[in-house]
Image: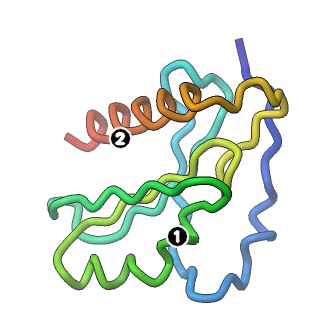
Amino acid sequence: MLIKALRTPEARFNGLADYQFAPNYRDDLAGYPGLRMHYIDEGASDARVALCLHGQPTWSYLYRKMVLGFVAAGYRVIAPDMFGFGRSDKPVEDALYTFDFHRKSLIAFIRAHWISVA
């Protein structure tokens, strides 16, 4: 069953200070049909990964000044926006926003992302 959600138009993210990162999306996360998760992915694909997770009420924009430093230090930086935040889809049903919902979505993201690039 699809999860009904809102999607912020890309134009809303134009001109953000110090946020020059190309958008990346996953819309294939197990257990999250119809939802699209945004993430930053910068650095060499074979480098050690710095996985940057945000809290509430922020998103990957939190890491805008750190990403290039991590990349310069030889890391690949991956910073997902949890559902409901930043460029990721925003489910309309308030009851979905639980710790377990976010935890499981991050696990699904990690599994899908690393399986697909392995």
Position of 15 relative to 12 (above/below): below
Does 64 sit above or below residue 77? below
Residue placed most toward the observer, 17 or 28: 17
Tell me the element at label 1. loop
Q: Quadrant of the C terminus?
A: top left
Depth check, front residue: 29 or 60: 60
Q: Which residue is mark 2?
A: 113
Residue at the image position 54 percent from the left and 49 percent from the top: 25
Which quarter of the rendered picture does the N terminus lie within? top right
State the image quarter where residue 10 is shown. Answer: bottom right
Across and down, in percent, residue 116 comes to: 30, 37
Residue ID at (19%, 81%): 73
Q: Residue at x 27, y 33 (%)?
A: 115
Q: Is residue 69 left or right of residue 60?
A: left
Q: Which mark is residue 22?
A: 1
- Residue depicted at 58% across the width and 27% down the height: 101
Q: Amino acid at mark 2?
A: His
| Disc 2 to disc 1: CB gap under 8 Å | no
Cα distance in 3D space between marks 2 and 1: 17 Å
Q: Is residue 6 above or below residue 42?
A: above
User: Along the horizontal axis of the image, is 62 left or right of 10?
Assistant: left
Residue 26: x %, y % from top left = 52, 42
- For this view, does 38 lie left or right of residue 48? right
Neighbour tally class for label 1: few under 14, some 14-19, many 20 plus, Cα within 10 Å:
few
* Secondary structure of the residue carrying numbered label 2: helix
The mark nearer the N terminus, 2 or 1, is 1
Q: What kind of colouring is applied to the model shown? A: rainbow
Question: What x and y, as percent, mark residue 92?
Answer: 84, 33
Which percent across, then down, holds residue 66? 39, 80
Q: Which amino acid lies under the numbered mark 1 shown in the image of this protein?
A: Ala
